Image (cartoon, grey):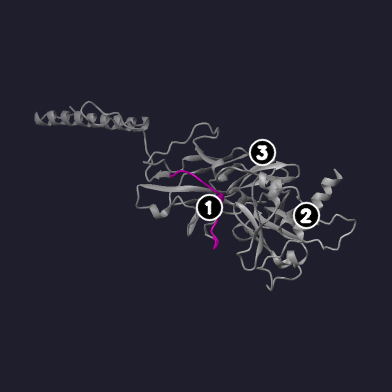
Amino acid sequence: MRLVILVCQLVLILRTEAQMPSECIGHETLRRPENTDINVVCGTEHMDMSIYLCPVYMANYNSSLMFLNNEFTKSECSGVPDLTADPPVLKFSFPINAEGLATCNNKVKIFNMKGTGEFSDFSQVQYVNISGKVTSMDPSGGTITYREQIMYLFSCLYPMQYMLNNTQLGVSGVNLNIRDNNGSFISTLSMQLFNDGTFSVPLELPESGINLKTKVFVRVKATNLTNRFNVLLDRCYATTTPYPEMVTYYDLFVACIRDPQTLVELNGVSQEATFRFEAFRFVEHKNLTVSTFYLHCITRLCEVDSCASLMPNCTGQQRRRREAPTTTVTENVTVSSPPIYVTKFTSVPENVASPHGVDKTDYSSPVVAVIVCIVILAVIVLILGVFFGVYMRHGKPLIN
């Protein structure tokens, strides 16, 4: 056994003493390692790091002795040298999913920050921080060493809702793990419209349109989500096109700005959020029989214990119409509805056609009573007229 260990150490030493790449000889980066030698790219599906390779050789290491998070026994946590680049670099990459994060023991933490940019209406926004380090493995087999350790730190910060783009979120211990969803997480979020508060009967949306002020019940629901997180709607608004990006749009609710006819019933307390509003028409459609619009809800996840602190503290502020922010809200974090058609006219029950093709009109009781009285008076007047005519024709006085 001791012989095997000695052989392994000898191999490492030989690899360390390997000839320096010719691309590093005389290169300006052939110097001691510096903190600025690492470049980090925070991608949508992968995190990529590139480290200047020549300083690694200058410190008496080589590409085979650099690993992610001290995972020296895992080949997938080692880097790949790129000698064609200028300067030569050592590249590391891992996917943002459970396997990629857990394999090399990267750390993922959630914390709150004040909302900025398109989220400036919110006092707190949750972010996900993915971090780790690239370290050198000292091949020295003795008690002491003269090699300095190389350590590069890296991290990427994502808004929690940004993580909805291509991943599904789950929890392991105190850290957040992200499981690959083979596509966009938007597919696991759904918006459905219902015609009552039981959320059991889907709302029918004929192309002829629903009536103005029809109550529309909306549910945004997440599936395949662990019970550590709830669904939180930050903003729901309507546009006249299927796309969330508009110069102007109409807010149903955003932070404490709320439509008077909109009532948020469930938000941030479970894995579904519900609200209701009354059907309306866009003024720009005043010359159209049917006004068509689409609902969009900006959705994020919140940890169960912290959801309450992320909810805005509303004090009855009035709704206002707002211009779109300079930075358009990312479509990948927005759930949208099918088209909603609203008619200009209020429809009534269809009349029953008579055998002659004339519609029978239903009158209310007061109207019928008035008509009957008018008919009776007309008959009385007619009878009196005939009576007076007969007596006047025969020249008989009316009173003897």
Report, in whole angstroms, how far the alpha carbon at label 1 lies from the one at label 2. 50 Å
Relative to the observer, which residue lies in front, 165 or 155? 155
**Is-magenta flag for residue 329?**
yes
> Closer to the observer: label 2 or label 3?
2
Q: Is residue 275 visible?
A: no
Above/below status of 147 relative to 224: below
Question: Which SS class for mark 1?
Answer: helix
165 relative position to 244: left or right: right
Does the residue at mark 1 contact the one at mark 2 (Cβ under 8 Å)?
no
Tag 3 secondary structure: loop
Find residue 226 and name its label. Answer: 3
* Position in image of residue 9 (x %, y %): 81, 52
Residue at 22 percent of width and 32 percent of height? 381
User: Which residue bears the numbered disc 1?
Assistant: 331
Q: Secondary structure at mark 2?
A: helix
- Label 1 or label 2, whichever comes before in sequence order: 2
User: What amino acid does circle 3 point to?
Assistant: Thr
Q: Position of residue 377 (x, y in %)?
A: 26, 31
In the rendered structure, which segment of residues is drawn in magenta? Answer: 325-339
Q: Amino acid at mark 2?
A: Leu
Residue linked to disc 2: 12
State the separation of the CA atoms marked 2 and 3: 44 Å
Q: Is residue 214 magenta?
A: no
Where on the picture, by quarter, is residue 136?
bottom right
- In the picture, residue 114 is in which quadrant? bottom right
* Left/right of residue 144 with respect to residue 284 in the rendered view: right
Q: In the picture, which quadrant includes the N terminus?
A: top right
Residue at left offset 43%, top offset 36%: 204
